[in-house]
Image (cartoon, rainbow, N blue to C red):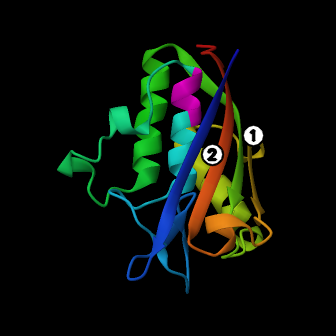
Amino acid sequence: MRIGNGYDSHRFEEGRPLILGGVRIPDHAGLRGHSDGDAVAHAVIDAILGAAAAGNVGSHFPPSDDAWKDADSIVLLERARAVLHERGYEVVNVDVTVVCESPRIGPHVAAMCSRLADAMGVPVDRVSVKGKTNEGMGWIGRGEGVAVHAVALIRTAMG
């Protein structure tokens, strides 16, 4: 068993769709980023790759590479899962905390957990997503963007 920690943050940007955990959130500015800006998927990618000592989202999908421009981050998560499998690991579970003043995360949790679970090849009951506010403090509290923390447990693949 190995544990990995992931973190990502992005500023909001008008004119882009907001995608978190592979789910499009309506009526809200999106996140600035080279790919689709999905900070949830990026934090999860960093957590699972980190647990396997296999780099991070930027080393596998660098923003300098136009191949990843506007890429679907759920596809990136599927590719990160393949890296784990190549190294002989599989995901056991993932726990995610999304920190933002808006949008409200709760109404989208079930859909996010389902998309993330499918991408990682685990049952949905092994994925947790929850939202927290920053109580109005700092750049998050001012509504400038989103920060995401993720923790992943992986194990040697069972065959």
Numbered tag placed on residue 139 in the rendering: none
Look at the picture and state if 150 lies above or below 107.
above
Residue 154 forms part of the magenta stretch: no
- What's the residue at 60%, 15% (across, down)? 157
How far across and down, in percent of the image, does residue 28 sit? 55, 82
User: Image quadrant of residue 110?
Assistant: bottom right
SS type, badge 2: helix
SS type, badge 1: helix
Disc 1 to disc 2: CB gap under 8 Å: yes
- What's the residue at 68%, 54% (across, down)? 113
How far across and down, in percent of the image, does residue 7 sit? 59, 43
- What's the residue at 70%, 14% (across, down)? 1
User: Image quadrant of residue 47?
Assistant: top right
How far across and down, in percent of the image, does residue 55 sit? 44, 25
Residue type at tag 2:
Ala
Foreground of the two, 120 or 134: 134
Residue identifier under label 1:
126
Question: Is residue 100 in view from this perspective?
Answer: no
